[in-house]
């Protein structure tokens, strides 16, 4: 059997801008063909180390609670761990029947959870990071756009639960960048000013500084404009 290092040479870790690696998998919601089944939608593919572990349980309750919010932003959720289908089913039933977290209880996880005992998908997505764990996936989050391109990746270690406000913020910021042809500054949230792409010539730089088109230019390379929250959310969220 090949070592993880050999496997990594065969399957390099996917990067931002790459096509999402394709796979077929068994999940708690039936078989999926990824990412083709999600064409036209954003999808967040995320891994967790193991079923029946506390940090993962808190994350699943939180993600399930937010599933409808993500769905309104045209984004589906897909989870994965190196566990079998029956473990997944038992864990999700336990979560619904017994676990309360941060005031959320009786939470039903409706999104698919991939069984990946073979680690085939986890290896394809660089979710096994051997110096952290050789047998459990790290907490990876892949944001994949409606064309099947990886747009952002977050990796957290086993002990650190993710920030779901940030995951949602990142999704909305990337959708805003696409729809309005802008960039978003540090800590941006809908309603905050957005960044206009930098001037690409000396003439454009000069024009930026003398423009009366509603730009706020601190210097030729740093111009912002207002983009109100309703305009952003009207364009992004399903009615
Ligand atoms: C947890 O989800 O609680 C956990 C999983 C693996 C290692 C450490 C914590």
Image: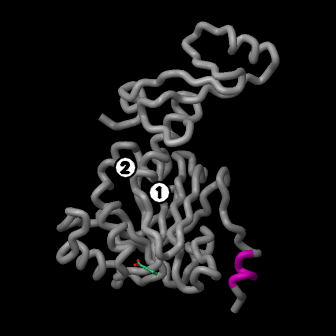
Magenta residue check for 7: yes
Q: Residue furthest right?
A: 202
The quadrant of the picture occupied by the C terminus is: top left
Where is residue 207 drawn, in percent x and y?
A: 72, 11
Q: Are marks 2 and 1 in contact (CB under 8 Å)?
A: yes
Q: Is residue 238 left or right of residue 45?
A: left
Of helix, strand and loop, which one carries label 2? helix
Magenta residue check for 60: no
Q: Is residue 114 above or below residue 75?
A: below
Query: Which mark is drawn over residue 70?
Result: 2
State which region is magenta: 4-8
Q: How many marks?
A: 2
Q: Please give the name of the residue rendered at 28% of the width and 58% of the height, measured from the top-left corner.
A: 65
Where is residue 24 drawn, in percent x and y?
A: 51, 69
Where is residue 147 drawn, in percent x and y?
A: 56, 46
Which residue, given by chain and number where applicable, does mark 1 sit on? 44
Q: Please give the name of the residue rendered at 69% of the width and 15% of the height, measured from the top-left corner.
A: 208
For ligand 1, give the image quadrant.
bottom left
């Amino acid at each position: 059997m090949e070592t993880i290092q050999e496997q990594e040479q065969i399957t390099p870790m996917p990067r931002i801008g790459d096509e999402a690696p394709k796979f077929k998998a068994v999940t708690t919601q039936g078989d999926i063909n990824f990412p083709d089944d999600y064409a036209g939608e954003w999808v967040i593919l995320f891994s967790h180390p193991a079923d029946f572990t506390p940090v993962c349980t808190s994350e699943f309750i939180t993600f399930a609670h937010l599933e409808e919010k993500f769905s309104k932003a045209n984004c589906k959720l897909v989870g994965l761990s190196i566990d079998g289908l029956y473990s997944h089913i038992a864990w999700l039933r336990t979560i619904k029947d017994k676990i309360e977290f941060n005031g959320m209880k009786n939470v039903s996880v409706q999104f698919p959870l991939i069984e990946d005992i073979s680690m085939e998908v986890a290896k394809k997505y660089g979710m096994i990071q051997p110096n952290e764990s050789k047998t459990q996936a790290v907490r990876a989050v892949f944001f994949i756009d409606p064309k099947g391109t990886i747009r952002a990746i977050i990796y957290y270690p086993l002990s650190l639960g993710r920030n779901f406000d940030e995951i949602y913020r990142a999704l909305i910021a990337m959708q805003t960048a696409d729809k309005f042809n802008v960039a978003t500054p540090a800590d941006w949230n809908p309603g905050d000013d957005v960044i206009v792409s930098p001037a690409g010539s000396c003439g454009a730089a000069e024009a930026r500084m003398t423009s009366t088109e509603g730009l706020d230019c601190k210097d030729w390379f740093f111009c912002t404009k207002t983009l109100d929250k309703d305009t952003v959310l009207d364009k992004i969220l399903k009615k």
